Amino acid sequence: MTIQATSKQYKSMQLLGVLLVLVGVVAGIAEAPVFGVTTGVLGLALYIGGRIGGWWANG
């Protein structure tokens, strides 16, 4: 069985993305909708970028 290691950079991007999405959800609930949506979208973009980057690096 061959296991390919994903770069720590992409894993940290994914983790940061998930954390930003969670902060965005909490901020949106706490009546800061503009900040919540902006943070959520940025987090989602980081998460997707990390997923694509990890996939691209390991081809």
Image: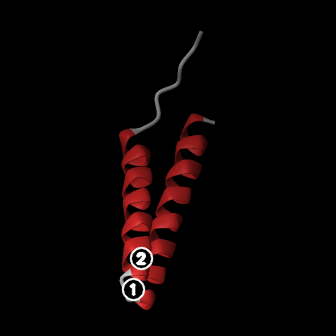
Looking at the image, which is closer to me, 29 or 42?
29
Instruction: Compute the Cα span from label 1 to label 2.
Output: 6 Å
Residue 26 placed where, x, y %? 38, 73
Instruction: Report the residue at 39% width, 51% height from top.
Output: 15
Q: Residues within 10 Å of mark 1 (few under 14, many from 20)?
A: some
What amino acid type is highlighted by mark number 1?
Phe
What amino acid type is highlighted by mark number 2?
Thr
Q: Is residue 25 above or below residue 55?
A: below
The disc label shown at residue 39, or none: 2
Q: Secondary structure at mark 2?
A: helix
The disc label shown at residue 57, or none: none
Q: Is residue 7 above or below residue 38?
A: above
**Residue to which mark 1 is pinned:** 35
Residue placed furthest toward the right: 59
Residue 49 placed where, x, y %? 53, 58
Q: Is residue 42 above or below residue 6?
A: below
Direction from residue 59 to residue 9 in the image, left or right: left
Looking at the image, which is closer to me, 20 or 4?
20
The N terminus lies in quadrant: top right
Instruction: Report the residue at 48% width, 81% height from top.
Output: 37
Instruction: Report the residue at 41% width, 64% height from top.
Output: 22
Residue 7, quarter of picture: top left
Instruction: Report the residue at 52% width, 24% height from top.
Output: 4
Check if mark 1's residue and mark 2's residue have beta carbons within 8 Å: yes
The C terminus lies in quadrant: top right
Q: Residues within 10 Å of mark 2 (few under 14, many from 20)?
A: many
Residue placed furthest toward the top: 1
Q: Is residue 10 above or below residue 36?
A: above
Residue 50 placed where, x, y %? 49, 52
Q: Secondary structure at mark 1?
A: helix
